[in-house]
Image (tube, helix red, strand yellow):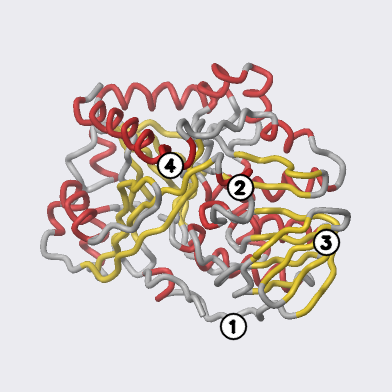
């Protein structure tokens, strides 16, 4: 039986009973493949709307990126709205711009409605390491304000040093409608909400084959689900074989995180006095925040192709100490990695494989908020209003150059170029 990775989140998860393994044949309106945020968001929106939903998870609910990520609630997309407008036109930018703050609001609504204990705290800072990055944040504030987001505060050099106990940053942008949380507990809470609405969830039930048709049949090792509609939401953990039409369009990438021993209240307050989460503005960015028990959780780095590094602490601890040298003697209690799914455009890929088979994938690092929006869009589409879903589905879904064998070296080469630009301050 595959359990959650040995992370801080797994060690501090709310008590939860396992869901059963699928055995035998069952029927439903909608079968969802994947028990992360994408699948859970779809399931919860659909059961609230009265659909009979079955969700199949290969391992445990929140086993993948949804239960391992940095826990940061970050608005917008991996490509901001000005880039979207330049590449896809004003009409598409207007449609997507109207949705780019919606995912975070859905999360807050879920937490409130279902009383999910996941340590949510408001406030997220994008921190600039150079004056050029700070100028870009000033332009981002103006851009987001054009799209109706008024909860932003530009932080100059003095203000950023009051918000972050580090000398690295020249400024920042505080988004009061961003925040941070315990992602595995959010996933577990959403799963319980699905169950309470009558949804059926199965763990240790990896999908082996999809038999397309009307209805479609989704097969596992010990059972099958006959469903009028299927939603494929496996993201970075879908694998290459189940649906090659999806795997060729994206690439799993690994990110690494460490969590320190619990810090004293004075030390924690000296690092992040307002308990905001932070990510820097580099292409290969660092991100960090405090947990509810005053650990510093620090992440960064990208491994293309999603292979786990041999020594996570050796990779991440130097990054942490560059930001907070005062933590030199602090012990690391947890270290883990997890995969997110990268697309060539850095934009999400939503669409239909068949008339009754939908897919959601490729959030490219913005999965916490975007997955929650995606579930709402799927529910709208199934009710007959597909305009917002189709705004994403119409975006070009381009395969990586060189196919599956060359996508890792090509992407790593491009990332090295941008990392050099970060170091040189270009």
Query: Which residue bears the numbered disc 3?
Result: 227
Q: Name the residue under label 1.
A: 17
Compared to residue 3, the image places residue 363 above or below, namely above
The residue shown at (74%, 63%) is 218
Does 65 appear above or below 134? below
Query: Which is nearer the eye, 289 or 337?
Result: 337
Q: Label 1: few (<14), some or many (≥20) within 10 Å?
A: few
First along the sequence among labels 1 and 2:
1
Rounded to the nearest angstrom, the CA distance separating label 2 from label 4 is 14 Å
Mark 1 or mark 3: name the one nearer the start of the chain: 1
Tell me the quadrant of the picture where the C terminus can be found: top left
Dot in front, 1 or 4: 4
Decide if residue 75 is on the left or right side of residue 224.
left
Judging by the rendered image, the residue that carries numbered circle 2 is 244
Query: Residues under labels 3 and 4: Cα distance?
Result: 34 Å
Which numbered mark, 1 or 3, is in the foreground of this view? Answer: 3
Chain-order first, disc 2 or disc 3: 3
């Amino acid at each position: 039986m595959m359990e959650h990775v040995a992370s801080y989140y797994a060690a501090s998860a709310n008590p939860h009973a396992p869901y059963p393994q699928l055995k035998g044949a069952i029927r439903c309106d909608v079968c969802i493949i994947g028990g992360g945020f994408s699948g859970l968001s779809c399931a919860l929106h659909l059961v609230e709307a009265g659909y009979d939903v079955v969700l199949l998870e290969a391992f445990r609910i929140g086993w993948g990126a949804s239960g391992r990520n940095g826990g940061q609630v970050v608005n917008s997309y991996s490509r901001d709205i000005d880039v979207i407008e330049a590449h896809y036109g004003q009409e598409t930018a207007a449609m997507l711009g109207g949705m780019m703050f919606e995912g975070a609001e859905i999360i807050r609504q879920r937490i409130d409605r279902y009383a999910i204990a996941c340590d949510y705290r408001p406030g997220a800072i994008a921190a600039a390491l150079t004056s050029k990055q700070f100028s870009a944040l000033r332009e981002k504030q103006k851009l987001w304000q054009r799209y109706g987001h008024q909860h932003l505060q530009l932080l100059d050099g003095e203000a950023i040093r009051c918000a972050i106990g580090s000398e690295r940053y020249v400024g920042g942008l505080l988004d009061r409608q961003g925040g941070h949380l315990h992602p595995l507990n959010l996933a577990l809470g959403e799963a319980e909400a699905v169950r309470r609405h009558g949804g059926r969830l199965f763990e240790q039930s990896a999908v082996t084959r999809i038999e397309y048709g009307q209805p479609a049949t989704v097969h596992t090792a010990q059972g099958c689900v006959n469903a009028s509609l299927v939603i494929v939401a496996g993201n970075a953990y879908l694998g290459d074989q189940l649906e090659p039409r999806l795997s060729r369009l994206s690439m799993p990438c690994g990110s690494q995180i460490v969590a320190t021993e619990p810090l004293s209240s004075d030390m924690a307050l000296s690092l992040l006095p307002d308990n905001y989460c932070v990510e820097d503005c580099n292409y290969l960015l660092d991100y960090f925040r405090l947990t509810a028990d005053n650990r510093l959780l620090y992440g960064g780095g990208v491994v293309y192709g999603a292979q786990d590094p041999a020594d996570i602490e050796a990779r991440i601890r130097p990054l942490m100490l560059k930001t907070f040298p005062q933590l030199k003697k602090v012990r690391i209690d947890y270290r883990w990695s997890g995969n997110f799914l990268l697309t060539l455009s850095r934009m999400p890929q939503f669409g239909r494989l068949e008339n009754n088979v939908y897919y959601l994938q490729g959030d490219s690092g913005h999965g916490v908020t975007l997955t929650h929006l995606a579930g709402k869009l799927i529910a709208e589409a199934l009710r007959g209003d597909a305009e917002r879903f189709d705004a994403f589905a119409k975006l070009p879904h381009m395969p990586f150059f060189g196919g599956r064998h060359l996508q890792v070296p090509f992407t790593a080469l491009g990332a090295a170029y941008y990392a050099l630009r970060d170091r040189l301050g270009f």
